[in-house]
Amino acid sequence: MSTIIKHKEFTNHKVYKTEVAGRPLTIDVGKVAELATASAMVTYGETTVLVAVTVSPRPRDGVDFFPLSVDFEEKLYAVGRIPGSFMRREGQPSLPAVLASRVIDRSIRPLFPYDFRNDVVVTATVMSVDRDCSPEVTAMIGVSACLAYSCIPWAGPIGCLEVGYVDGQIVLNPTNEQKHASQLDLTVAATDKKVIMIEAGAKELPDDIMYDAIVAAHEDIKKQVAFINQIVAEIGRDKMTYDHADFDQELFGKIVEATMDEARAAMDTDDKNVREERWNKLIEHWHELFLEDYPEMDKYLEEITYKFQKKIVKAWLLEGHRVDGRAKNEIRPLAAEVGVLLSGLALVTGMLWARKSWGVWWTWDPRLTTTLIMWFVYAGYLVLRGLDLPPQRKSLVCAVVGVVAFLDVPLVFISARIWRSIHPAVFAAKGGGLEPEMKMTVIACVLSFGLLWAGLVWLRKRQLDLRARLDALAANADNPAA
């Protein structure tokens, strides 16, 4: 019996082309990842990203949030390399990949319905890289196109651009060479009507230049949105119906009407602990007023609190009033002191933010007299959630709440995964015991920490010896007779 072979035909294959910032953009749909809810191969210049979006048919049970997952996957084959490690496999996502995932997440999440609880997974895999065409921008445009023409309810589409400032000129999607010379590193995502996400870093540029850069980006993004709308008009699908998340709007309306003045008074303080205490008393008052008529109100309390506080804060911001009483151009109070612990430990307290908000920085002068190491820390107790420790990604790149600067002190930093393994809260959550795999992890961590600490002690001794020799040489240089 002979084998029958048929040529595969892609009946839904479509190719759409336009230009973005003077470079060709191509969106190829209907040929790859056909089992996904929506997919596209997006090429910008010579950068190619495969974007696939999937949605679950039913909402996830027992969650009070929208379960969206965004993965930006970097592959070494995109730059013509093969992993050279023993495993010959890709490792965990790099920091730029995690940051790219978060940028895409922040841009698309607000446009989903607030009561949508179906799992949505967005995967952007970089297939090839052109150094002058950003994979992150390419992925964002592809994600927008896929969500827009898919059956997933979403209030897009959006567009995305990077903006630089080179030689006194605003440059859209700057090349790699222009990025190195640019005084501005700005990423803008927007719909055709409003800007929805900005990520920026600049070398102390005036506000007017920053504003003009955002406006210029938005004007060009409108062309991207119009292009995606053309795709939707041709191949767009009807949006799916979904089970709306349970929320008692009638109860929320009664609570707002009855306790608005009390809620505003509870929120009007610059002390977060006082605000929490006042709000807890307000919740007790809600129980007194409405628990008899609404016996299941407790399951809505968290969402009621979020919506109520958001309503108050938004009204205040429109009036020019901030929750903690600060002026519009006033940052949070900062404090710094040295000599807290050991030799030269400095503690800086305040709410800080950095685009690359984790890592180790150090400076070293020729005589080894100044060594600065900084580590940004984000712990679970900082958000008042008890055992709800932040995930590894959040520990790496979330907002910086505490900054510890170590001067001339060798230090070992434990990764977020190891921290969760040895944290006392984990022991308590496990009922006083650990799983065998976690026990092995703890043992390996302790042994590794001991070996690393011994090595750092030796290096510290060598550093002190070198410093002593340099001081002696300097003393002899000042004393010709010696």
Image (cartoon, rainbow, N blue to C red):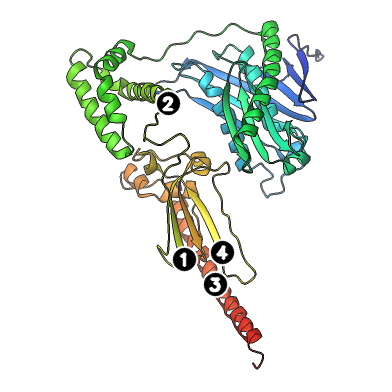
Residue that mark 3 sits on = 458
- Circle 1 SS class: loop
Residue that mark 4 sits on = 371
Three-letter residue code for mark 2: Leu
Question: Mark 2 and mark 1 in contact (Cβ < 8 Å)?
Answer: no
Gap between marks 1 and 2, in whole Å? 42 Å
Q: Tell me the residue at 58%/74% (across/down).
A: 462
Residue 339 coordinates in the image, percent (x, y): 42, 65
Residue 198 coordinates in the image, percent (x, y): 58, 30
Q: Left of 10 or right of it: where is 153?
A: left
Whether 263 is drawn above or below 343: the answer is above
Q: Left of 454 or right of it: where is 95?
A: right
- Circle 2 SS class: helix
Q: Left of 21 or right of it: where is 480?
A: left
Three-letter residue code for mark 4: Thr
Closer to the eye: label 3 or 1: 1
Q: Earlier in the sequence, mark 4 or mark 1?
A: 1
Q: Earlier in the sequence, mark 2 or mark 4?
A: 2
Gap between marks 3 and 1, in whole Å? 19 Å
Q: Nearer the viewer, residue 93 or 359?
A: 359
Residue that mark 1 sits on = 344
Closer to the eye: label 3 or 2: 2
Q: Nearer the viewer, residue 184 or 207?
A: 207
Q: Earlier in the sequence, mark 3 or mark 2?
A: 2
Label 4 environment density (alpha carbons within 10 Å; few <14, some 14–19, many ≥20): some
